[in-house]
Image: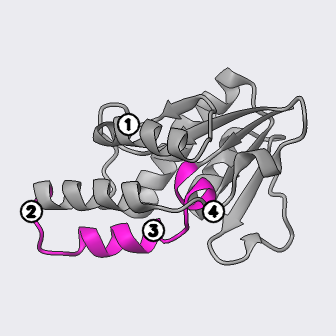
Amino acid sequence: MRISFDLDGVITDGAANSFFTSLRQSSLSFEQQRKAALGFYASSKPKYLPSLLMSQGDTGFIITSRQPEAQALTYRWLRQHHILLPVYFVDPFGDIDWLSYEEASREAGKRKARVIQSVGSTIHYDNNPFIASELCRQLPGWTVFPMNDIFGIKKGGVTK
């Protein structure tokens, strides 16, 4: 089976959404916000190791909306935590505008759907409800597990 995972909030600890919401609302300059974001990524702790959600013989992929300046740090963090899966960045040019969170999430969902189709993943784990909803619209019949930041997989489990 081919399984894909979101990074922030699924593989890394789930405080990313609240951190970035408060960061966007701060009076910090763009450069200060960028440095704070990189620091946040570097200090994140693992939440769910993909290997625990995969069976022997499964192939895993990470599909993330992290912006281009976080790519090198992302690869270092994954190696440090022995997570050795291919990574796909759906915002390689940093053109998703996260000031409008719901709209940005839907755009990220559309881009993730294209990657999910191209790698042949049939199951995807994501913590962003807007992305999960968009994936269900873009990929009818695929299995999307919406992850809750506190309790893991939401009650009811599978969204189709």
Q: Position of residue 82 (x, y in %)?
A: 61, 41
Lower sequence index among marks 3 and 4: 3
The residues colored magenta run 7-30
Figure colour scheme: one colour
Helix, strand or loop for disc 1? helix
Do the residues under discs 3 and 1 have CB atoms within 8 angstroms? no
Lower sequence index among marks 3 and 1: 3
Which amino acid, by three-letter code, is at mark 2?
Ser
* Residue 80 in the figure: left or right of residue 118: left
* Residue 140 in the figure: left or right of residue 111: right
Residue denoted by label 4? 47
Question: Image height check: is 92 above or below 41?
Answer: above
Choose between 114 and 94: the one closer to the eye: 94
Label drawn at residue 29 = 2
Q: Is residue 83 magenta?
A: no
Do the residues under discs 4 and 2 have CB atoms within 8 angstroms? no
Choose between 69 and 25: the one closer to the eye: 69
At 71% from the left edge and 61% from the top edge, which residue is drawn? 146
